[in-house]
Amino acid sequence: MSQIQTVKQKLEARLPGVSAVIDEPLKPDSPWMLDVVLDNRAVNVEWRPHRGFGISSQESHRDSYFGEGPDEILSSVDETVGRVVELIKSGTSTVVPSELTLAELRERLSLSQAQLAQRLRVSQAAVSDLEKNLVRSQLQTLRKAVQALGAQLEIRAVLPNARAFTLRLSEPGPSGTRRTQPPRKRRATRRR
Amino acid sequence: MAESKAARLEEFYRQLREVPPAAGFEEAWVQISRTLNQVEDELSGVPYDPSKWQTDGRLYPPQLDSERAFSGHPKVRRFRSLQHNTLIGENGSIEIRTLANEVVFWKVGADGKGVMDQ
């Protein structure tokens, strides 16, 4: 049984009366769709074998979102089932990633400021300040906060020609010097 | 300033209607991809990056690996995205439907026939 079929089966067990219909691709390695509907609430689950699950709540205003990718990406069957059940039962919408603040991310993970403070070994007031004053916060503190939530902080630089790069954040070493990766061996390149 | 998704989609439909009817699947496929990418380049403010899976706020044309069977219509190919099905006929006709099966765009092929007329 494939992972998307397991998701369907688990949803049917946890949500009596749910309609969960798999839209199968022509080639099994391609993206699969699972359309979940219960009491006028609908969620689309996209499964990409070897990549995970994409989830989007389906609402009428999204009829103009032609060809968009999913709002949320999850890696496991159980996470996906739990999130879909939560969305269907609460009637809430999936969260578009660019709209998430640090506080919203923390709340999504059901963590209080005190719990995050404990992970960071700082006071709750410090977490509160971090969430309110992101611009003034030290980058390293922000990165540690994001890591404590099990995520990675990325900063993207978008050039005028629309090419985008993710900037790597190097960690300062013990004496304040930057910790660097050992130099890579250069491969001989041939000029064209 | 970037236009709303609804405004961009309407512009895509408008421009796609203005293009002469396609003579076959390949031509219709190129028309859809080229038109939507042009509209999004001009109006979305989001760089083209189809390798991203999670939404980046940009609208993308159907991908070949999203093809599904369309039973009872061997001359029609169906491409599924999260909220839509795009149907393309062997004759170059195009139809876009919501998941509720509402037709939100249609265009005949060069032979004057629609997707469901084949």
Image: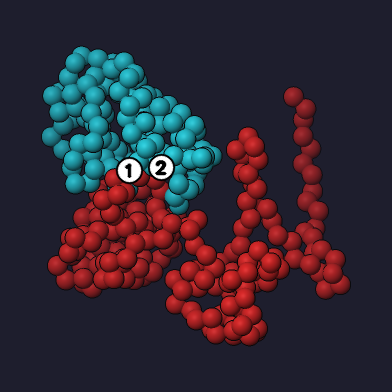
Q: Above or below — where is A167 with respect to A8?
A: above
Q: Are marks 1 and 2 in contact (CB under 8 Å)?
A: yes
A72 or A101, which is in the foreground? A101
- Helix, strand or loop at mark 1: helix
Question: Badge 2: few (under 14), some or many (20 or more) residues near its Cα, within 10 Å?
Answer: few
Could you tell me if residue A34 is visible in this image?
A: no
Question: Which residue is pictured at 63% across the width and 34% down the height?
Answer: A161
The quadrant in which residue A17 appears is bottom left
Q: Could you tell me how many numbered marks the image carries?
A: 2
Residue on which disc 2 sits: B4
Name the amino acid type tagged 1: Ser
Identify the image quadrant of the N terminus of chain A.
bottom left
Specify the subunit that label 2 lies on: B
- The x, y position of residue A129, in whole percent, is 62, 76
Which colour represents chain A?
Answer: red
For the residue pair A187 and B49, the one nearer the viewer reads as: B49
- Mark 1 surroundings: few (<14), some (14-19) or many (≥20) residues within 10 A: many
What coloring was used for the rendering? Answer: by chain
Above-or-below relation of A110 to B36: below
The answer to whether residue B4 is visible is yes
Say which quarter of the image contains residue A159: top right
Q: CA distance from mark 1 to mark 2?
A: 9 Å
According to the picture, the residue beneath numbered tag 1 turns out to be A64
Name the quadrant of the C terminus of chain A. top right
Report the amino acid beneath label 2. Answer: Ser
Please determine whether, in this image, residue A183 is positioned above or below residue A173: above
What residue is shown at x 20% (from left), y 14% (from top)? Answer: B111
The answer to whether residue A185 is left or right of residue A102 is right
Residue A128 falls left or right of residue A112: right
Q: Position of residue A65 (x, y in %)?
A: 35, 45
Q: Could you tell me residue A66's position as x and y percent?
A: 34, 41
- In the figure, the shade used to draw chain B is cyan
